[in-house]
Image: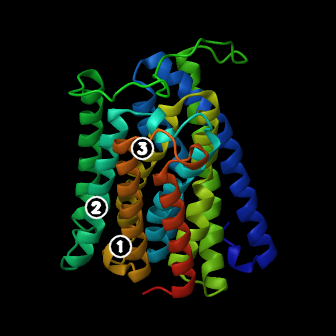
Amino acid sequence: MGMLADWSLAALLAAFLLAAGGVLLTGLRITSVVDRLADRTGVGEALAGAVLLGAATSLSGTIVSITVAFDGYASLAYSNSIGGIAAQTAFLAIADVVYRKANLEHAAADLANIFQSVTLIVLLTLPLMAQTLPDFTILAVHPVSLVIPVVYVFALLVTRALREQPMWHPVSTKDTRADTPDEEADDAGWTSTSRLFLLLFLLMLVMAFSGWIIAKTAGTLTGRMALSGSLVGALATAVVTSLPELVTTIAAVRRGALQLAVGGIIGGNTFDTLFLTAADLSYREGSLYHAAGTSDQFWTLTAILMTAILLGGLILRQRKGPAHIGAESVALLVVYMSAIAAQVIMGTDG
């Protein structure tokens, strides 16, 4: 891959698309593995979605952010992380369209998903705070990058405690889908818990390799075609590396694992904020947050707005909207499409 500069444009695009296919096909398999692990380990679909599914499906995006940051593409690294959060939140609205029985956020009521949404808003404000603070770094790493993983881990511990001893419960209705273990079925020999974890690990390796190829080709294409790093990150690499979330979310909805579907998106989004820490560690020219442009900040604000809308939907729990689609899902799609239009119009890094 060191000779990418000599590759033709067609070859670069082909490699990018092949890697995208690898990410997509891997995502198809991961959902069933994580769903079964949620039942086997007893952690529940919401927490399994936040940790196992979120981390597994986000791995390719992590590799992209680390690789392009190390190569000096600060805006691309930043917008890949935040743009993925916005795209994945919009995917949840698409899943709501697929689930025809009721509003997805109503049916998948779970305290863990509500708390993870609050955590995500907190984590998304930290990069904005970093950009307003002096350009101070420790070994070329901004202090906020060290705070983000601490907040993330603390939130996971609190989420686990909320599952074990919740202080309130959502009102159960005929449309509420309870998180209950599924009946086991033989899965081509992959029946033991240890083998399920091994299969998950192997799938994550494929994700990681595909993400590395995407990062290298995207970085080369950005320079070759003189494209905006924010534009490529938010609308190309972020969407491509977020495809597993779309596939796994729809697959989880069709399996009836609604808490897993919602938790996978929200948990994946909180996990994606760790991209910023990893990217800042890899970016050796100073603070990643100060190297990012106005367009990148725009996507951070968009992600916060979309998360707040989703949180409102989880709390309000509208039972049925037009065509069984929640009002929050419509709002999410409108905000995301408007943000894309604005990004295309802005065109360049701020």
Is 212 located above or below residue 6 in the figure? above
| Secondary structure state at the residue bearing disc 2 | helix
Q: Which residue is mark 2?
A: 145
Where is residue 141 drawn, in percent x and y?
28, 67
Q: In front: 121, or 277?
A: 121
Q: Is residue 226 left or right of residue 173?
A: right
| Secondary structure state at the residue bearing disc 3 | helix
Q: Which residue is mark 3?
A: 267
Rendering quarter of residue 36: top right
Tag 1 and tag 2, C-beta contact below 8 Å = yes
**Residue flagged by tag 3: what amino acid is it?**
Gly
Tag 3 and tag 2, C-beta contact below 8 Å = no
Where is residue 184 drawn, in percent x and y?
61, 12
The residue depicted at 75 percent of the width and 57 percent of the height is 18
Rendering quarter of residue 44: top left
Residue 288, numbered circle: 1
Q: In front: 282, or 328?
A: 328
